[in-house]
């Protein structure tokens, strides 16, 4: 007996545990409400009382003229484009797809158009103006004094903006001028460095070219003439060679043997074509006995002092 009672108590506890878990799950899902008794709510009944609604409408409806109400109930205007294309045009909206936004908006547009076409003649019959007159002007909301203050403020603001823009342009020009000046100085320094390098090479005998001198002369000549550049000056320098330089180039050349080139030979000794007797036997030449003294020659310091002393006596 004791064993049977123990088995029954364990089965009851298991059932109670299972029932508690089920109840908790049902409560979490919202199927249960707090309290011991569950209240069942009846469904809401919807009443479409058409007679009552019309009665309410008649109660608060006022008997006003159409000019005060301006209400219109009409269908859409005739679609002229569809009619011209030969399509079927219906006044009702049975053939309009409510999911098509374009068709729906076009129907609203034609309905508003039809309303305007019906309302304008009625307004004209009642002698109500539907257009704004040509001499109609809106009244200013602000006074003339206030608008004058605004105008002065706007002019001052515009002037300050123009001044700031000019200052910005001047700063930009100064920066550009400084940049150009720095570039010119750097270019001159680079040319000077290249020239000094070429001079050192020539002095040490590493190079026998004197092109750097021709370039310097060409640049100076270009500056004097007001343009042309170093290339044009060097080309002109090559075309026009000095006669003295040409003679020395023909006589001595560019290097080679120089010793003994001025020695006389038998041919040069026998050649007397350049001899002139008048020049050779002249009295005032440096080979003669002297000749007539120069009358305009200034006396020496001692002679001048003697002459000065004689004049003072």
Image (spheres, rainbow, N blue to C red):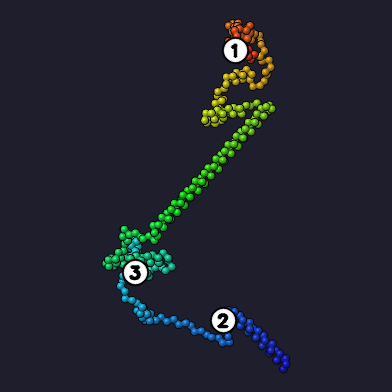
Element type at mark 3:
loop
Residue 274: x and y in percent read 59, 9
Element type at mark 1:
helix
Mark before the other along the chain sequence, 3 or 1: 3
Quarter-wise, where is residue 15 in the image?
bottom right
Mark before the other along the chain sequence, 2 or 1: 2
Q: Quadrant of the N terminus?
A: bottom right
Vertical side of 161 occupied by 230: above or below: above
- Horizontally, is 232 left or right of 301 in the view? left
Mark before the other along the chain sequence, 2 or 3: 2
Quarter-wise, where is residue 236 in the image?
top right
Distance in Å between CA atoms under marks 3 and 1 = 142 Å
Q: Residues within 10 Å of mark 1 (few under 14, many from 20)?
A: few
- Horizontally, is 279 left or right of 122 in the view? right
For the residues bearing labels 2 and 3, Cβ distance under 8 angstroms: no
Residue 213 visible: yes
Residue drawn 49% across the image and 47% down it: 163
Q: Residues within 10 Å of mark 2 (few under 14, many from 20)?
A: few
Residue drawn 34% across the image and 61% down it: 81
Which disc number belongs to residue 311? 1
Residue that label 2 marks: 31
Residue 86 visible: no
For the residues bearing labels 3 and 1, Cβ distance under 8 angstroms: no
Residue that label 3 marks: 75
Residue drawn 65% across the image and 86% down it: 16
- Comparing 259 with 144, the one in front is 144
- Horizontally, is 154 left or right of 234 in the view? left
Q: Residues within 10 Å of mark 3 (few under 14, many from 20)?
A: some
- Comparing 166 with 263, the one in front is 166
Q: Nearer the viewer, mark 2 or mark 1?
A: 1
């Amino acid at each position: 007996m004791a064993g049977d009672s123990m088995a029954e108590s364990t089965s009851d506890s298991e059932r109670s545990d299972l029932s508690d878990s089920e109840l908790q799950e049902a409560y979490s899902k919202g199927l249960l409400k707090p309290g011991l008794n569950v209240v069942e709510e009846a469904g809401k009944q919807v009443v479409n009382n058409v007679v009552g609604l019309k009665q309410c409408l008649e109660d608060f409806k006022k008997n006003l003229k159409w000019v005060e109400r301006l209400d219109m109930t009409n269908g859409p205007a005739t679609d002229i484009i569809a009619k011209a294309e030969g399509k079927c045009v219906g006044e009702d909206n049975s053939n309009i797809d409510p999911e098509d936004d374009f068709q729906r908006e076009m129907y609203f547009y034609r309905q508003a158009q039809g309303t305007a076409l019906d309302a304008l003649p009625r307004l004209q019959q009642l002698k109500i103006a539907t257009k704004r007159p040509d001499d109609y002007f809106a009244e200013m909301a602000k006074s003339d004094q206030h608008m004058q203050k605004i105008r002065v403020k706007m002019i001052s603001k515009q002037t300050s903006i123009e001044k700031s823009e000019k200052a910005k342009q001047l700063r930009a020009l100064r920066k550009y001028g400084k940049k150009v000046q720095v570039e010119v100085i750097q270019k001159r320094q680079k040319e000077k460095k290249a020239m000094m390098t070429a001079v050192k090479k020539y002095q040490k005998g590493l190079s026998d070219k004197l092109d750097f001198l021709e370039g310097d002369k060409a640049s100076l000549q270009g500056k004097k003439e007001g343009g042309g550049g170093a290339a044009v000056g060097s080309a002109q320098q090559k075309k026009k060679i000095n006669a003295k330089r040409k003679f020395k180039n023909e006589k001595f050349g560019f290097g080679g043997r120089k010793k003994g080139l001025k020695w006389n030979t038998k041919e040069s000794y026998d050649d007397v074509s350049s001899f002139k007797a008048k020049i050779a036997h002249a009295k005032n030449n440096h080979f003669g006995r002297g000749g007539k003294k120069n009358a305009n020659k200034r006396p020496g310091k001692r002679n001048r002092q003697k002459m000065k002393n004689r004049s003072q006596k």
